[in-house]
Amino acid sequence: MSRLTQKGQGAPFGLLSTVTEVVTTAPYSNSTTTAGERFDSSDGREFVLVQNGAVAIAAGKLVQAPPVIADHQNMAVTAYAPASSTVPYTTITVTLGATAATVNQYAGGYLVVNDNAGEGQTLKIASHPAAALSQSLVITLEDTAVTAITTASEVSLIPNLYTGVVINPTTPTNTPIGVTLYALGASSAVPAVAGTTNVFGFIQTKGPVSCLNGDADLTVGSAISPSNATAGAVENGVIAQGFVGRALQAGVNTEYRTVYIDL
């Protein structure tokens, strides 16, 4: 039986024998930061816990992080308040583009300072309220900037890569993050909200795994890329499409073949 241990802590548990305890509406229904926790097995395979998005994903499919929203990039900063002895958390206020933000949509994700004062810093997001399009959004950060952020700064929001995952599309909207081990049902709320259907499960990020093949010419030992013709599939390596691992079996188009995923 494959058994997992959480990196750095915890006793091992069965990977596939406890699926009903992992893909559930209950244990993680109040959590927005559980997604992204990593585990490994004794044979070197690596896994990550994800919350699926609004569309179910079958087993053996390449998975992508939630799409980056263009209207939440390169935003103006209107206020920055670092943590102090009286206020133990840092907040930053930005002006959204023409797309609204839902409550904690970016919890567990990142605020990146992409231009001007403080540029080059990546700060983890703790929480934030909802905000309408083109309105102010106050974000509470887990991290305080080392170099001060000012109203001259421009920032971008990057979602938690493992909350609201989607099948890897033929035209990428974020980065591939792993392969499904079993079917993941659809979540009705992303991030997770108590009382709704919040579907969590493991995807594999490293080691041998079955994945849909979208290239009849797949060759053993070759680099593999996300397919630009079939969603959730891989194909022979193409530099412009990036690489996600290597082929362990010769390709048969539309069949599931063993690949060594390395994400």
Image (cartoon, helix red, strand yellow):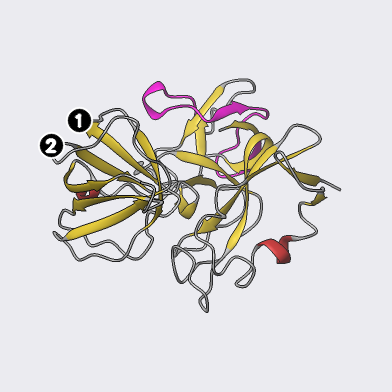
Which residue appears farthest toward the bottom when viewing the image?
195
Q: In the rendered structure, which amino acid carries the disc numbered 1?
A: Ala
| Front residue (pair 224, 156) | 156
Residue 163 screen position, x and y as percent: 48, 54
- Asked whether the viewer can see residue 13, the reply is yes
Residue 205 screen position, x and y as percent: 61, 38
Q: Earlier in the sequence, mark 1 or mark 2?
A: 1
Q: Which mark is residue 117?
A: 1
12 relative to 151 in the view: left or right: right
Residues drawn in magenta? 236-258
Residue 67 screen position, x and y as percent: 35, 49
Q: Residues within 10 Å of mark 1 (few under 14, many from 20)?
A: some
Q: Is residue 237 magenta?
A: yes
**The C terminus lies in which quarter of the figure?**
top right
Splitting the image into 4 quarters, where does residue 191 fall? bottom left
Q: Secondary structure at mark 2?
A: loop
Residue 95 screen position, x and y as percent: 16, 53
Q: Which mark is residue 139?
A: none
Eyeballing the image, is 104 above or below 48? below
The reply to whether callout 1 and callout 2 are in contact (CB within 8 Å) is: yes
Q: Secondary structure at mark 1?
A: loop
Q: Which mark is residue 152?
A: 2
Separation (CA) of disc 1 from disc 2: 6 Å
Residue at 48% in and 71% down: 193
Q: Is residue 81 magenta?
A: no
Q: In the rendered structure, which amino acid carries the disc numbered 2?
A: Ala
- Asked whether the viewer can see residue 184, the reply is no
